[in-house]
Amino acid sequence: MDSANSIPSDERGFTLLEVLIALAVLMVGLMSLAYGIGIGLAVVQMSTMDTIAREKAREAMEDVFTARDTSTISFTQICNIPTGSNPNNCLFVNGLTPMYTADSSGLVNTNAAATQGVLETYVTPGPDGILGTADDITYNLTGFQRSIQVTSVSSSDGYTVLAQVTVTIQYNPLPWLSRTVTMVTVMSPYV
């Protein structure tokens, strides 16, 4: 008697084809899970960089308002340096530049800030989880660029000239991805 025929049909095991199909389905599921975890980690990394970019845009905008409010600079100096000479004594350079620390006036994206050539940093707590201790980790913002663009705008009364200030932060969270954060406000000459 044949042994294969003697086993009842409800007691037979899986065939090789069924096992291979089950393994293929399992591999697709595991690969999808690994891909999802990788994307999740990339999003977490980008969210940290997004937060840094938004904070640096706010800081730059606040620096301009503070310099105007404390009369460190005049309202007429809140403009971009024209190509060639600088008859208006404008302060802000044109285009994206590395994120250098503020100059002696407390302003970023000026010629004086670029001359210093010190990159801004981002500090995180170290292993102890407390910011301000010796084990803090400092990162240079080398992949970040910033621009401050100032445009003159006439007010609705036709007499007051306003300045539209646009701060743009650009960075690359991943080698193939470029992200931009932009903050826009309108500023008057009055404090």
Image (tube, rainbow, N blue to C red):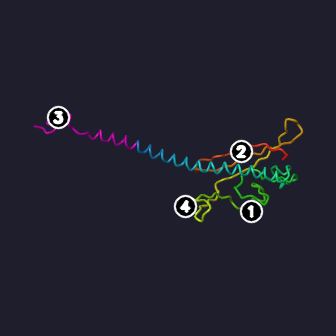
Looking at the picture, does residue 133 appear above or below residue 166?
below
Counting residues from the start of the chain, the first of labels 3 and 2 encountered is: 3
Q: Nearer the viewer, residue 72 or 98?
A: 72
Specify the farthest residue to the left.
1
Q: Earlier in the sequence, mark 4 or mark 3?
A: 3
Q: Are marks 4 and 1 in contact (CB under 8 Å)?
A: no
Indicate which label's residue lies in the foreground, 4 or 1: 4
| Residue situated in front as seen by the camera: 11 or 137 | 137
Q: What residue span does the magenta drawing correspond to?
A: 1-28
Q: Secondary structure at mark 2?
A: strand
- Tell me which corner region of the image, top left, top right, bottom left or bottom right, holds residue 12: top left
- Across and down, in percent, residue 50 comes to 62, 48
Residue underneath mark 2: 183
At 41% from the left edge and 42% from the top edge, which residue is drawn?
29
Pointer 4 residue: 128
Q: Nearer the viewer, mark 1 or mark 2?
A: 2
Q: Amino acid at mark 2?
A: Met
Q: Which residue is mark 3?
A: 8
Amino acid tagged 3: Pro
Mark sitting earlier along the chain (3/1): 3
Residue 32's spot in the image, x, y percent? 44, 43
Instruction: Residue under label 1, please give it.
Output: 116
Location of residue 102 by image quarter = bottom right
Residue 78's x, y, as percent? 82, 50
Apparent side of residue 64 relative to residue 128 in the rendered image (left or right): right
Q: Amino acid at mark 1?
A: Gln
Tag in front: 3 or 2: 2
76 sits to left or right of 45: right
In front of the other: label 4 or label 3? 4
Answer with mark 1 or mark 2, whichever residue precedes in sequence: 1
Q: Nearer the viewer, mark 2 or mark 4?
A: 4
